[in-house]
Amino acid sequence: MTTAATAVHPPEADESALLSVRDLRVSFPGKGRRAPRTEVLKGVGLTVRPGETLGLVGESGSGKTTIGRAVLGLVPVASGSVTFDGERIDTAGKARRRALSRDLQVIFQDPYTSLNPSLTVGDTLAEPLLGQGADAREAGGRVGELLDRVHLPSDAARRLPREFSGGQRQRVAIARALALRPRLVVCDEPVSALDLTTQRTVLELLLELQEETGVSYLFVSHDLSVVRFMSHRVSVIHRGEIVETGDADRITRSPGHPYTRTLLLSAPVTDVAEQRRRRELRGTAEATGSA
């Protein structure tokens, strides 16, 4: 991969981009009837190319999840634009949004709440297929194919979500997201609710599926080490603004922005001496105000 230049401002138009977000602003009502609105996104810009993973990383409250929700049409956009495959979609109506679900899907954070507990896994996976006009036989065949792709046994189709572990449930959620063969999946903290061993297994599955299908990911996470493992490029968001964008290896090894350096120092490591060194460096950065 070539090294991308650091970008603080919204990116220039990229003709090769599958997803393009430009000067995006989102605000939410303040607390109380007369409270002013709070601007959560302040002119955000990013692009995702076909077959690429763009990691979007920032701490809690930075606005990263709001970007994903704006792309999915789940929050209103105050200004700016979201363009998918050359079509502006931030102004799309409900009917167009339903049609877009064939190409644009999401994997949510919590596998325990993202699946309907009263539906079998087979019904969960068949639901989007039937909604897009597939007949029962076609949907059944696709369900079996999906279970195989996420390495779950065929009898999983007859079982309820509560019969599976957290990692297995997230595999079901991944299968559901891929059911319609989308071109882009928004991955919203998809492994943060899992233990470390299961996290790696799920991340490797996502990479395997990307290699097989060519799907693009907008991968949202607070964990820079996870983003480094998954991403081709990384955008760092801080207080509603993109502060740094570039090649994943460069951003996660030699970041240019003080906030990115703080995230890097905060990333968990197993080596005790390295943990101590990072705590000292972070404390120094905070004391001097460079964080």
Image (cartoon, grey):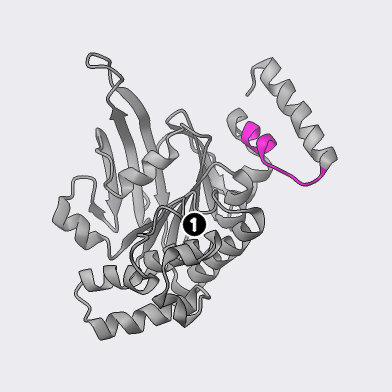
Residue 72 x/y as whole percent: 30, 50
Which one is in front, 185 or 20? 185
Q: Is residue 105 left or right of residue 249?
A: left
The residue under label 1 is 53
Q: In the current view of this chain or complex, which residue is farthest to the top? A: 34
Above/below status of 285 relative to 271: above
Q: Is residue 98 left or right of residue 122?
A: left
Which quadrant is the N terminus positioned in?
Answer: bottom right
Residue 28 x/y as whole percent: 29, 28
Residue 274 x/y as whole percent: 81, 39
Name the residue at 32% across, 82% down.
Answer: 140
Q: Is residue 47 left or right of residue 260?
A: left
Residue 268 colored in magenta in the image = yes
- Amino acid type at circle 1 is Thr
Using the rendered image of the protein, determine whether residue 180 is visible from the camera's viewpoint: no
Which one is in front, 289 or 97? 97
Which quadrant is the C terminus positioned in?
Answer: top right
Name the residue at 45% across, 57% down.
Answer: 217
Region of the chain picked out in magenta, as a range: 261-271
Above/below status of 123 relative to 4: below
Numbered disc 1: secondary structure: strand
Name the residue at 64% across, 44% down.
Answer: 252
Using the rendered image of the protein, determine whether residue 111 is visible from the camera's viewpoint: yes
